[in-house]
Amino acid sequence: MRLRHSPQIWSTFPELVCGVLHATGINPDVDVDARLAPFTAAARARLADGPESGFPEIQAWRRAFATMGLPPTRYRCAAESLLRRYRREGSLPRLHPLVDLGNAVSLGHAVPVAVLDVARISGDLAVRHATGEERYLTLAGEEERPEPGEVIFADSAGRAHSRRWTHRQSGRSAVGGATGEVLIVVEAMHASAGIDVPRMLAELECALADVWSAPARSAVLSATEPAFRIPPG
């Protein structure tokens, strides 16, 4: 299996920095509370100075959504949605320890973090424009078809694992109690993304080692090195 962005994505968004991490040995029977606190504290401190809409990380994704023809206040990247919810409610729902960790890291850095169950992905995974034939499963179990030209995470079987790029993940590859192998994708476009994305990968890799004793491998992708390969299990 490999993850890659299409040449069209790199051409349209040359500022993109994508970090990818693959890990095995995941289980839900761990406590990550101590790991979440620094990231939620960082988000709380930033939000005290002003709403998430002013963060450079969020502004960069708003520009990207506008470039894709999406109203950026209607369709928000996942990090902005998390920050909005945290600002209003003061907490996030607890779903699975690894998802909770990914959400906290996303919250603290204001950068989208996708956590996918590798076993639920068929073949390769490409970040590309939809043809309109792909199928997307919502978290509620309803099937949708992405619009032609929409940026999605698509596997070899024509299943979409996200809609509108970083706006919404699919329920098909959502991490659950039986998940053992994961792919984590971190994507940013702001000016310091080249520093922040590798730092986020390091924080995630450290947590995986300390909490799960999970073997992990990571890389930062680029237009010249666009593919991340996962060896057969």
Image (tube, rainbow, N blue to C red):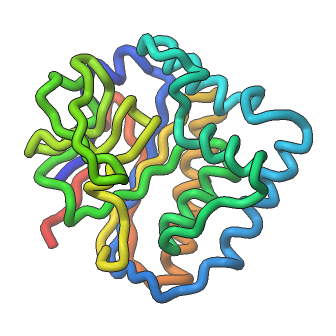
Q: Can you give x and y, in whole percent of width and height, for residue 146 in the image?
A: 25, 28
Establish if 192 lies above or below 28.
above
Q: Could you tell me which residue is drawn at 47 percent across and 12 percent down?
A: 67
198 to 182, vertically: above or below:
above
The residue under the point 35% across, 35% down is 163
Total marks placed: 0
Q: Relative to residue 122, is residue 72 drawn left or right? A: right
Residue under the point 19% across and 55% down: 121
Q: Is there any visible trace of residue 229 in the rendered image?
A: yes
In the picture as drawn, the residue positioned furthest to the bottom comes out as: 29
101 sits to left or right of 108: left
Task: Indicate the quadrant containing the C terminus: top left, top right, bottom left or bottom right.
Answer: bottom left
Q: On the rendered image, what quadrant is the N terminus found in?
A: bottom left
Query: What residue sits 50% from the left and 20% below the top?
Result: 64
The residue at the far left in this view is 157
Q: In this view of the protein, which residue sits in the foreground, 204 or 132? A: 132
Residue 174: image location, x then y, percent: 35, 60
90 on left or right of 18: right
Residue 188 falls in image quadrant = top right
- Vertical placement of 45 versus 23: above or below? above
Q: Quadrant of residue 31?
A: bottom right
Q: Position of residue 167 (x, y in %)?
A: 46, 35
Q: Please state the horizontal and vertical placement of residue 33, each as a whole percent of the image.
A: 67, 78
Q: Is residue 195 visible?
A: no
**Above or below 142: residue 206:** below
